[in-house]
Structure formats: C-alpha cells, structure tokens
Amino acid sequence: MFSAVLDANVLWPSLQRDFLLSLAIEGLFRPLWSNVLLDEVEYNESAKRMKRGAVAADATRRAAFLRAEMARAFPDAVVRGWEALEGSYGLPDPDDEHVLAAAVVGGAGVIVTHNVKDFPSASIPDGIDVVKPAQFAFDTVSLDPSTALRALEQIALRSGRGGDPPRTVAHLKRHLVSTYRLHDAVALIPDA
C-alpha cells in the first residue's frame, strides 16, 4: 500500500476530507501527516465553524474532536522526526517545509496539496510526486472503483448525525463534483 502526505488545505474541506480518509480506511492508501499539519487542520476547522456561526467554544471543541478522531482512525499516520530536515529543501514558502520533510521521513510516494506551485519539482526528492486532490482521488479510485463506492456508502451511513440531513451516495457524488471538482474520480465509481 502506498503512502500519501495530505496537506492541511486538502483536509479541512469537510466532504473532501471524509472522502479521502474513507478511501484510506478502505485500504486504498495510507495517510501521513505531521503534528504541525494537524494543528493547521484543527485551527482551520475551528475558524470555519465560527465563520458559519458556531460559538467559539463549540467550534474549538468540535475541531479538537475531529483531530482526535483522525488520530484514532489512523494511529500510525503521524510522522515523527522530520524536524531535522525542515528548511533543507529551499521551497518558495518556508511554511511548507514541514510537509515535504514529513513526506521524506514517512516514505510517502505523494504529497497531496492544492498548492502544487509551492512544491517545485527541482526541490522534490526522487520518488515523491506532488499532485492536486482531484488527481490523487482519480488515481486512488482507479485502483478499485468498487472499494471507492464502499467508502461513499460508509459516508452516507454516517451522514444525518448531529442534526445534518442524511445524504445518499448519489448526493455525495454530485457534491464531490460540484464543490471539489472530483469529476474524473467520481466518474469511475459505479452506481450504488
């Protein structure tokens, strides 16, 4: 099974995160991240909830719960010992160094990020690709579209909790296309 570092900007959009992590739960890849990356996810999740009207304490509690659930579901995802490599790659944005360092130490074959321009190929060690989430979703779903359908079915089963309306697989597919532009990946997934 291949490993992928999922950048924070890929993990804070709710359904995209749920879809990618559900693919990982189904065994299609192994997610990796650093604690710094999880800090970013937690901060952005809390900020997103407050922007949508949540009380700060509730937003903070729910963001911490998300982080704890990610840690529970993927206990071996946190890469440790990357700190010595931070700053050694000369990336345009020094704040992205921890992502690449975690990929190297964790043995990732891919970094999934919306900011591919911040990871120029000349700075990336051999054996690591940098791709956007749409390409990663397509590549991952193409490994086993039926397993990707199972992942969506599990998301549908979990929906409706916490006062949100339940969602069908068809609704989830439409949302993945319209909001996250995962057209090619969704086109591979068979109907439920």
Image (cartoon, rainbow, N blue to C red):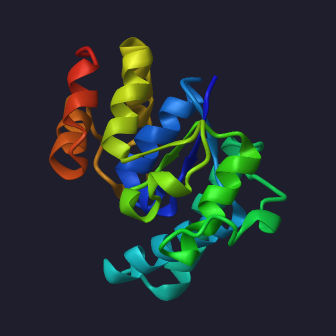
Q: Going by the image, does 63 lie left or right of 131?
A: right
Closer to us: 127 or 187: 127
Would you say 75 lies left or right of 178 here? right
Badge count: 0
Give the residue displayed 65% in from the left and 54% down from the top.
Answer: 33
| Occupied quadrant, residue 141 | top left
Indicate whether 116 appears above or below 31.
Answer: below
Q: Residue at x 43, y 54 (%)?
A: 113
Q: Is residue 142 above or below residue 99?
A: above
Residue 30 visible within the image: yes
Could you tell me which quadrant the N terminus lies in? top right
Residue 179, percent across and down?
A: 20, 52
Tell me which residue sits at (56%, 51%) in the image.
124
Extreme residue in the bottom direction: 56
Reply above or below: 91 against 180: below
Q: Residue at x 26, y 37 (%)?
A: 172
User: Looking at this view, is 49 or 38 the one in front?
Assistant: 38
Q: Is residue 157 left or right of residue 128?
A: left
Return the x and y of residue 106 as percentages of the image width and height.
Answer: 73, 45
Q: Quadrant of the C terminus?
A: top left
Residue positioned most to the front:
122
Quarter occupied by residue 99: bottom right
Q: Nearer the viewer, residue 82 or 49?
A: 82
Q: In x, y percent, where is residue 74?
A: 69, 42
Residue 169 in view of the camera:
no
